[in-house]
Image: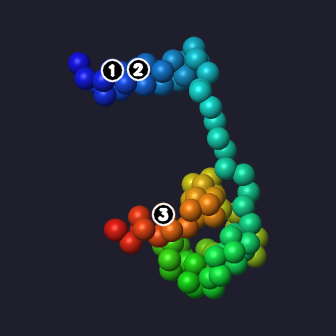
Amino acid sequence: MTTFGQDLIESASEALGIAEGKRAPAGIFPASDIDVAAVRKRLGLSQREFSSRYGLSLAVVRDWEQHRVRPDQAARTLLRVIDRNPDAVSDVLAGD
């Protein structure tokens, strides 16, 4: 069996153990709140430019910045990646 196959079996066994309550997850990394306006402004982008560059709805960006809606965990994670490495996200999205 390949190393990949062995890793896959180990991962599945670990997941089963966690699901059955026999093992604790290795780590949980919840995404905390993020200041969307501050990220956008650090990048020197308007709301329209930010939403367009990162494939986000302009209305959603406005709602996040005005605290009408809180980004869900997946969005907060994406926003943290944008904050730390905006070019990587742009490059990936440009390849779509």
Q: Residue 88 carries which label?
A: 3
- Category of crowding for the residue at label 1, using alpha-carbon neighbours closer than 10 angstroms: few (below 14), some (14–19), many (at least 20): few
Q: Which mark is residue 10?
A: 2
Q: Mark 1 points at which residue?
A: 6
* Quarter of the image that includes the N terminus: top left
The Cα atoms of the two marked residues, 1 and 2, are separated by: 6 Å
Q: Which residue lies furthest to the left in this view?
A: 1
Residue 9 location, x and y as percent?
35, 21
Q: Which residue is drawn at 49% across and 65% down?
A: 89
- Closest to the camera, between mark 3 and mark 2, is 3
Amino acid at dot 3: Ala
The Cα atoms of the two marked residues, 1 and 3, are separated by: 31 Å
Residue 11, relative to residue 38: is it above or below?
Answer: above
Residue 36 location, x and y as percent?
69, 69
Q: In this view, does 31 lie to the left or right of 14?
A: right
- Category of crowding for the residue at label 3, using alpha-carbon neighbours closer than 10 angstroms: few (below 14), some (14–19), many (at least 20): few
The Cα atoms of the two marked residues, 3 and 2, are separated by: 31 Å
